[in-house]
Image (spheres, grey):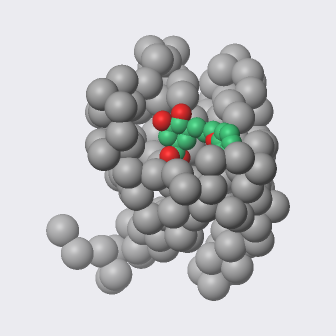
Amino acid sequence: MPTVLVLNGPNLNLLGTREPSVYGAHTLADVEACCRSAAAAHRWTLDFRQSNHEGLLIDWIHEAGLGHADGSVAGVVFNAGAFTHTSVALHDAIKAVTVPVIEVHISNVHAREPFRHHSYLSPAAAGIVVGFGIDGYALAIEGLARRANPETTRT
Ligand code: CA2
């Protein structure tokens, strides 16, 4: 059974503890539960991770690339947190692999401070889901599933 890898970047371990007006009241454990049921609906297993370290996130993208090449990884859903707005290295990592990476943001970054309007990841991503709260993760998994099945892909 293929796996969908959901990666979360810096400070997302704090979800639900502060800034509920921006990020809602749900915790990262709640996000994981939503992702697990969205993945199961497509008969995918879920691998859900969080790190505050850029290098580890890069290693995980490389690992997903190898997994995609051997058929074990269907795709990646990636909320890179603030690294979205700073990291050329994460851009390069996504460009270096063939696994589809869907960029997700809980908040509508375009309605926030100007420094959140630019993403280094977007040009390398297969798709982007922004501003749907934690539902964005499930929407991204749904998008990956449609992309993987040509009969459900509308272009
Ligand atoms: O909206 C998103 O999902 C973000 O990726 C979240 C990042 C932010 O830097 C991006 O611009 C947009 C921040 C994640 C930190 O989340 C916290 C949640 C609660 C308390 C503290 C941090």
Closest to the observer: 74 or 119? 119
Q: Residue at 31% of width from left, 33% of height from top?
A: 117
For residue 33, above or below residue 64: below
Q: Residue at 49% of width from left, 18% of height from top?
A: 87
What is the total number of numbered labels drawn onto the structure image?
A: 0
Closest to the observer: 115 or 152? 115
- Let me know if residue 139 appears in the view: yes
Q: Residue furthest left?
A: 155
Report whether 96 appears left or right of 33.
left
Q: Give the quarter of the image for residue 129.
A: bottom left
- Let me know if residue 70 appears in the view: no
Report whether 141 appears left or right of 117.
right
Q: Residue at 18% of width from left, 68% of height from top?
A: 155
Q: Residue 86, how many percent across, how many down?
A: 46, 17
Q: Residue 83, how many percent across, how many down?
A: 54, 25
- Quarter of the image where the N terminus is located: bottom right
Closest to the observer: 119 or 146? 119
For residue 56, above or below residue 3: above
Q: Residue 65, how many percent across, how many down?
A: 59, 38
Q: Residue at 46% of width from left, 39% of height from top?
A: 98
Q: Quadrant of ligand 1?
A: top right
Report whether 87 appears left or right of 12.
left
Q: Residue furthest right?
A: 29
Closest to the observer: 113 or 138? 113
Q: Residue 90, how many percent across, how many down?
A: 52, 23
